[in-house]
């Protein structure tokens, strides 16, 4: 059974650019959550989608956005990149979104220069 | 200004010892508590969870203890092996409409020496 797949694994972008990260959940999973992991702040929740609807959002600026498609695949977008956006972005999926049931992908390492 | 990096607690043990990793959580309304293991270059991997109406749960070589009075969670690993070396995170979820929202602790680095 394939796990959560995130692409690309590594990304280097310049300040001011925008970036789109992709997440394919485990087959049949309808809930997708996104997290940002940095040495300074640890793991922080960005948002959660279920059946194409955002149900929960963390405390991040509006530059961070996401969406979910009808096949449950999800993307997150960061516009006007800042140096501080350099992080490991993790996606996790769950069948229905119950708090203890998430499986994480290996993440996308974003470096902003 | 410059952000200060988290200084993660560390635990160093010998192979075969038992390990205990502790975590203080913040939300007394949390319903689920989960322990994750994160190895270098990978995402967090589920180890074990416990609901708020329990105080102990056992898995294979792992036990989680929950003390709601002092908002404390611990993970015990029996007969620790070098493959257990990783960063361990506790996480909490409030249940209900807190879909997908896990609040993570800062993490503990476990190093197992052969």
Image (cartoon, coloured by chain):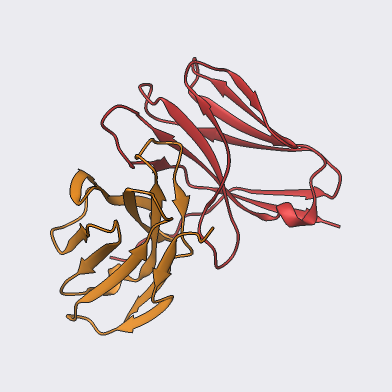
Chain colours: A orange, B red
Q: Which image quadrant for residue B5?
A: bottom left
Identified at 61% across, 31% down, the residue is B74
Answer with left or right where residue A69 lies relative to residue A10.
Answer: left
Residue B104 image position (x, y, % from top left): 43, 43
Residue A3 image position (x, y, % from top left): 50, 59
B91 w.r.t. A64: above or below: above
Residue found at the far left of this picture: A62
B21 w.r.t. A93: above or below: above
Residue B43 in view here:
yes
Answer with left or right where residue B3 lies relative to residue A69.
Answer: right
Q: Which image quadrant for residue A8?
A: bottom left
Residue B16 image position (x, y, % from top left): 86, 45
Residue A42 in view here:
no
Residue A11 versus residue A99: which sits nearer the camera?
A99
Residue A4 versus residue B19: which sits nearer the camera?
A4
Residue A45 image position (x, y, % from top left): 32, 49
Answer with left or right where residue B67 lies relative to residue B98.
Answer: right
Answer with left or right where residue A1 lies relative to residue A72.
Answer: right
Identified at 21% across, 68% down, the residue is A77
Q: Quadrant of the C terminus of chain B?
A: bottom right
Identified at 73% across, 36% down, the residue is B60
Residue A84 versus residue B88: which sits nearer the camera?
B88
């Amino acid at each position: 059974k394939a796990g959560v797949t995130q692409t690309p694994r590594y990304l280097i972008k310049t300040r001011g650019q925008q970036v789109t990260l992709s997440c394919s959940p485990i087959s049949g999973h309808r809930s997708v959550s996104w997290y940002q992991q940095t040495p300074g702040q640890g793991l922080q929740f960005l948002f959660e989608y279920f059946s194409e609807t955002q149900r929960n959002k963390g405390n991040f600026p509006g530059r961070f956005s996401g969406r979910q498609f009808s096949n449950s695949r999800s993307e997150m977008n960061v516009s006007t990149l800042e140096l501080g956006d350099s992080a490991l972005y993790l996606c996790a999926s769950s069948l229905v979104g119950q708090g203890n049931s998430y499986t994480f992908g290996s993440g996308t390492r974003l470096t902003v220069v | 200004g410059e952000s200060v990096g988290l200084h993660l607690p560390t635990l160093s043990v010998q192979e075969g010892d038992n390990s205990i990793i502790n975590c203080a959580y913040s939300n007394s309304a949390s319903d689920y508590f989960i322990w994750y293991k994160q190895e270098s270059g990978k995402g967090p991997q589920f180890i074990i969870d416990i609901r708020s109406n329990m105080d102990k749960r056992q898995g294979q070589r792992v036990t989680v203890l929950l003390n709601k009075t002092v908002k404390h969670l611990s993970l015990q690993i029996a007969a620790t092996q070098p493959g257990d070396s990783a960063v361990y995170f506790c996480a909490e979820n409030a249940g209900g409409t807190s879909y997908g929202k896990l609040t993570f602790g800062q993490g503990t680095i476990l190093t197992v020496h052969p």
